[in-house]
């Protein structure tokens, strides 16, 4: 059911500040005609009873069933939309081989518009069913297929930020899949920005354009400079990969004698609306640069297990005050579920702190220092952190924020959450949701107060 002009009575959780969970207990959330939260009334507020009675009277009150919990929708900060057919496969080789052997051939297929429509339609429906209400998408180099992704997101109601991938370096990109020239990469980017900006169905700006140099190795300097100029001019978002693996990090050091973060900054691609995927090998100076520029990191814990050669120091980045969100990196990461990526973030943070070599004694094994995060931090980066990274009013329940939300039905028979009244209350319920919920538990998904689920 759509919730615009309705008031939802719900219990649930959100994380306005890192490390703190705000528990909603039968809160009344009033949603406006524009899909934004107008007000939140909690039991104990002086007018709670009056508001509730009035909305009930006019038939504008909607209540969640007991055992159902409201969460902000997930913000997936790094998705390669065209790689969905490859999800869960092609995980046996390092990044630089994976790109040439599997990924570029697959992405080249999106020249075929019918194939693109089919694949993108499935992806967007599946992500909504997984509770992802906002996604930051890399598409391909193709204009028509990328426009189709825009149309599909608008049609199915997902909030999306979409970039035509720019990649024109003939040394790193194959003949069959690359922008013909810097001009082609730059003009293609402009054309997509125009398409999204004036799209007749995009009056609420639910889809936004993104300047998307794939990563420095696949772009010429001329393209990176041109894209930096577009980003400055249009003030739109920027996304790219940054210091992901030993190879990717080393390539930029040897081509430019500087790190990814330094070079992106020089090209004008490191700003408040820039999202750097992975960023595993940021130096201390790089981290400071990213912080000062107020750019963000898309942490992709599952993908990093396969392709990064390292674990991103999430706790350190959060403690330094960097903006960090969570990304599935479909299909570098083999799961489309943000919940599974929350778990991945927690697990890998523990492995980083404890070390992993059983042949070493505990002190020699644990050389990294503090790195553990918990379910609160994982939930924070999957919701609030993503909203902050994108500079969008999503990921939290606050007046003025968009009502992008999901319902977790903890009683779903086919689901995987089992609560026990004797043991489970308060934050413990959220902990169990983050650690055990699965798709059958995700009962509803709203974007801007509109129901965006098939069933
Ligand atoms: N670096 C450049 N392209 C890609 C990609 O598609 N996935 C990942 N994980 N890293 C990349
Ligand atoms: Fe990626």
Image: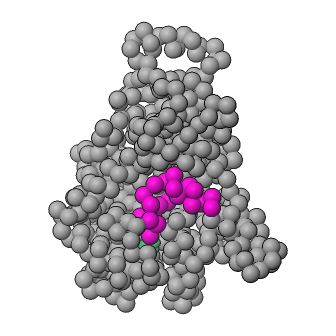
Q: How many marks?
A: 0
Q: Splitting the image into four quadrants, where does ligand 1 fall?
A: bottom left
Residue 245 placement: quadrant: bottom right
Residue 220 placement: quadrant: bottom left
Instruction: Please tell me whether residue 253 belongs to the stretch shown in magenta.
Output: no
Q: Is residue 320 visible?
A: no
Q: Position of residue 285 (x, y in %)?
A: 68, 74
Indicate the quadrant containing the C terminus: top left, top right, bottom left or bottom right.
Answer: top left
Q: Position of residue 22 (x, y in %)?
A: 64, 36
Q: Along the horizontal axis of the image, is 254 left or right of 175?
A: right
Q: Is residue 338 visible?
A: yes
Q: Residue at x 48, y 51 (%)?
A: 75
Looking at the image, which is closer to me, 211 or 325? Answer: 325
Q: Residue at x 38, y 28 (%)?
A: 4
Position above or below: 257 against 320: below
Q: Residue at x 29, y 41 (%)?
A: 454
Looking at the image, which is closer to me, 403 or 192? Answer: 403
> Which region is colored magenta?
325-347
Q: Along the horizontal axis of the image, is 128 left or right of 151?
A: right
Position above or below: 142 against 62: below
Indicate the quadrant containing the N terminus: top left, top right, bottom left or bottom right.
Answer: top left
Q: Along the horizontal axis of the image, is 294 left or right of 394?
A: right
Residue 31 placement: quadrant: top left
Q: Residue at x 33, y 88 (%)?
A: 170
Q: Along the horizontal axis of the image, is 69 left or right of 288?
A: left
Q: Position of residue 144 (x, y in %)?
A: 21, 64
Looking at the image, which is closer to me, 384 or 232? Answer: 384
Instruction: Please tell me whether residue 336 belongs to the stretch shown in magenta.
Output: yes
Colour approach in the figure: one colour
């Amino acid at each position: 059911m759509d919730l615009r002009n309705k008031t939802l009575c719900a219990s649930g959780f959100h994380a306005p500040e890192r490390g703190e969970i705000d528990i909603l207990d039968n809160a009344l959330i009033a949603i406006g005609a524009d899909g934004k939260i107008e007000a939140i009334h909690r039991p104990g507020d002086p007018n709670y009873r009056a508001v509730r009675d009035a909305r009930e009277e006019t038939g504008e009150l909607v209540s969640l069933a007991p055992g159902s919990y409201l969460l902000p929708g997930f913000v997936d900060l790094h998705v390669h939309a065209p790689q969905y057919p490859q999800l869960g496969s092609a995980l046996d080789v390092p990044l630089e081989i994976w790109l040439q052997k599997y990924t570029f051939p697959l992405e080249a297929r999106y020249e075929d518009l019918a194939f693109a429509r089919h694949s993108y339609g499935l992806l967007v429906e599946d992500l909504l069913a997984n509770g992802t209400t906002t996604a930051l998408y890399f598409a391909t180099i193709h204009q028509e297929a990328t426009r189709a992704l825009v149309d599909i997101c608008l049609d199915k109601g997902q909030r999306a930020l979409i970039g035509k991938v720019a990649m024109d370096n003939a040394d790193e990109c194959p003949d069959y899949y690359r922008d013909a020239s810097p001009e082609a990469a730059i003009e293609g980017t402009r054309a997509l920005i125009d398409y999204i900006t004036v799209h007749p169905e995009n009056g609420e700006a639910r889809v936004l354009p993104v300047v998307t140099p794939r990563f420095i190795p696949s772009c010429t300097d001329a393209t990176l400079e041109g894209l930096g100029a577009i980003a400055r001019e249009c003030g739109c978002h920027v996304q790219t990969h940054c210091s992901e693996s030993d190879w990717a990090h080393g390539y930029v050091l040897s081509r430019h004698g500087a790190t990814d973060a330094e070079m992106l900054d020089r090209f004008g691609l490191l700003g408040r609306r820039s999202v750097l995927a992975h960023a595993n090998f940021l130096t201390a100076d790089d981290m400071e640069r990213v912080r000062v520029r107020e750019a963000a990191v898309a942490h992709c814990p599952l993908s990093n297990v396969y392709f990064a050669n390292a674990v991103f120091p999430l706790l350190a980045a959060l403690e330094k005050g960097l903006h960090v969100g969570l990304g599935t990196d479909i299909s570098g990461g083999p799961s489309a579920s943000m919940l599974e990526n929350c778990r991945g973030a927690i697990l890998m943070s523990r492995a980083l702190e404890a070390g992993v070599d059983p042949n070493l004694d505990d002190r020699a094994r644990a050389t990294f220092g503090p790195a553990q995060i918990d379910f609160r931090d994982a939930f924070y980066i999957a919701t609030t952190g993503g909203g902050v990274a994108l500079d969008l009013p999503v990921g939290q329940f606050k007046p003025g924020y968009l009502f992008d939300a999901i319902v977790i039905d903890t009683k779903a028979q086919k689901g995987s959450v089992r609560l026990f009244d004797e043991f489970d209350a308060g934050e413990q319920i959220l902990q169990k949701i983050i650690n055990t919920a699965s798709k059958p538990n995700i009962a509803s998904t709203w974007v801007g107060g509109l129901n965006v689920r098939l069933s």
